[in-house]
Image (spheres, rainbow, N blue to C red):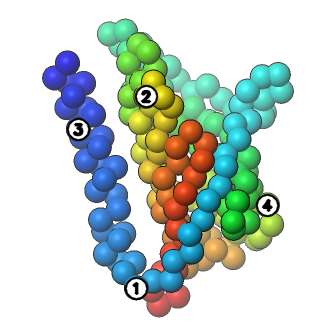
Amino acid sequence: MKKKLFTILVFLALVLGLGVPLSQAMAGSPRTPVQAWEIPQCVDPDPHPDCTPGEWTYPDGNMHVRNMVQIYNAIGINDDRLTGTNTLVVNANWDAFGFGPGWGTFHNQSAYYDGYWEGTFAALMTSEGYVSRIVGQGYGEFDGLVIKATEVNGFLEGVILALPNH
């Protein structure tokens, strides 16, 4: 129990700490609020061909997942720069019920622009679903932009920030 509590506390400290340096660096930068939905594409009957289960191990009755590839259709609600194909590489340390921390990387290829987003996420899976903190950088037409968001059960809400001196 102490180990589980310690893991959760470390995870929360990591998630909460991600925003501090970015917030300080972005003070005064133009901010565009954004929202999006993410629709999973790794489900039957016709899963996306790039979806992979990764490596699963079961230490002490828990589940450890490494390098699972998940594909999502991202649909920008108020900003179509988020619309596209989002590829996640997922790692997780879940208990026997599938609850616990997850983390990984993402690459969101825009459907309408010559640009993409890349970054990292830290998530927590609970009995009510998941919450994920996301930080990413824009490339191509999105060069000089940063996205910072929270996603809860497929609904993303956050901001796109312009980097200073860009």
Q: Amino acid at mark 4?
A: Ala
Q: For mark 1, give the secondary structure.
A: loop
Alpha carbon distance from label 1 to label 3? 31 Å
The tag earlier along the polypeptide, 2 or 4, is 4
CB under 8 Å between discs 4 and 3? no
Residue 127 placement, left or right of 79: left
Q: Position of residue 53 (x, y in %)?
A: 61, 25
The tag earlier along the polypeptide, 1 or 3, is 3
Few, some or many residues within 10 Å of mark 2 (<14, 14–19, 20+): some
CB under 8 Å between discs 1 and 2? no
5 to 133, vertically: above or below: above
Q: Amino acid at mark 1?
A: Gly
Q: Which residue is mark 3?
A: 9
Q: Which residue is mark 2?
A: 126
Residue 49 numbered tag: none
158 to 93, vertically: above or below: below
50 to 110, vertically: above or below: above
Res. 67 in view: no
Of circles 4 and 3, the one toward us is 3
44 to 141, vertically: above or below: above
The tag earlier along the polypeptide, 4 or 3, is 3
Q: Amino acid at mark 2?
A: Thr
Few, some or many residues within 10 Å of mark 3 (<14, 14–19, 20+): few
Q: Which residue is mark 1?
A: 28
